Image (tube, rainbow, N blue to C red):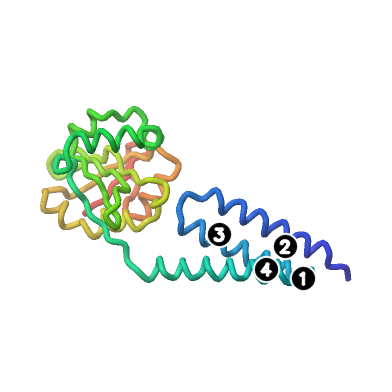
Amino acid sequence: MNFDWMKEAIGYAASLIILVSLLMTNVFRLRLINGIGSVLFGAYGWLIGSWPVCAINLVIAGIDGWYLLQSMRYSAYFDLAPATSLGAEYLRRFFLFHERELMEFAPGLTLEDLQEAHTCILFRNMLPVGLFSYRQAGADADIVIDFLIPEYRDFKAGRYLYRTKRMFFKEQGIKRFHAVARHPSHPRYFSKNGFVREEGKAGGFVNAL
């Protein structure tokens, strides 16, 4: 039986997967998808008898695997700093630098909205990677925005905010966070972090602390 079509299919699939990996902004996903593509390309090289193609792609897959293990082995250090403690100018610069993406996740958001709300800068390994802002009314708090820069959009930050910092928010008198999904990624993100659909509110989610 002629298996040439199978070899070609593996080669095209490997190329497509590696292409997709280059579109990833999250480094973990990039490494994971690129590693899968490299393994397939290595298999393609073996099938067509091209040992250099096979060897170099298996080495690339090994490098991706090593970095993935390192990222899973070491826990990221998170910190949440009130914007007021960093200064109005710092918040303004952060807002202006990320304004275009902030508008995608919270259309119509203004710097004044952030200044009037409880706004915090999220740090990961001492790098400013996100913005968390909410308005509190008694035991309820409405999330103005929960934003992360593309390179760090995984669920670690969400676990930190809604699990690790749970007692911190409860000490502020907050018992429930309310959020509205304004971006296609929001429903999955909120669901992963303990939110459930809020009845009677279009796109609404609620998380009881």
The residue that disc 2 covers is: 10
Badge 1: residue crowd in 10 Å (few <14, some 14–19, many ≥20): some
Q: Which residue is nearer to you in this view: 76 or 196?
A: 76
> Eyeballing the image, is 115 above or below 43?
above
Q: Which residue is depicted at the point 47% across and 49% down?
A: 25
Looking at the image, tell me whether mark 2 or mark 4 is earlier in sequence order. Answer: 2
* Residue at point 83%, 67% (across, down): 3
Going by the numbered disc 4, the residue's amino acid type is Gly
> Do the CB atoms of the residues marked 1 and 4 lie less than 8 Å apart?
no
Q: Amino acid at mark 1?
A: Leu
Q: CA distance from mark 3 to mark 4?
A: 14 Å
Q: In the figure, is residue 13 to the left or right of 110? A: right
Q: Residue 122 at what x, y percent from top left?
A: 26, 49
Using residue 57 as the reference point, say whether residue 100 is left or right of it: left
Residue 47: assigned label: 1
Cα distance between the residues tagged 1 and 2: 9 Å
Which residue lies under the disc numbered 3?
Answer: 33
The mark closer to the camera, 1 or 2, is 1
Q: Nearer the viewer, mark 3 or mark 4?
A: 4
Q: Which amino acid lies under the numbered mark 2 shown in the image of this protein?
A: Ile
Residues at circles 1 and 2 in contact by the CB criterion of under 8 Å? yes
In the rendered structure, which disc, 1 or 4, sits on the residue that comes first in sequence?
Answer: 4
User: Real-space Cα distance between discs 3 and 2?
Assistant: 15 Å
Q: Amino acid at mark 3?
A: Ile
To which quarter of the image does residue 99 belong?
A: top left
Q: In the rendering, which numbered label is found on residue 42?
A: 4
**The residue tagged with tag 3: helix, strand or loop?**
helix
Who is closer to the viewer here, 184 or 65?
65
Q: Select label 2 or label 4 by which is in front.
A: 4
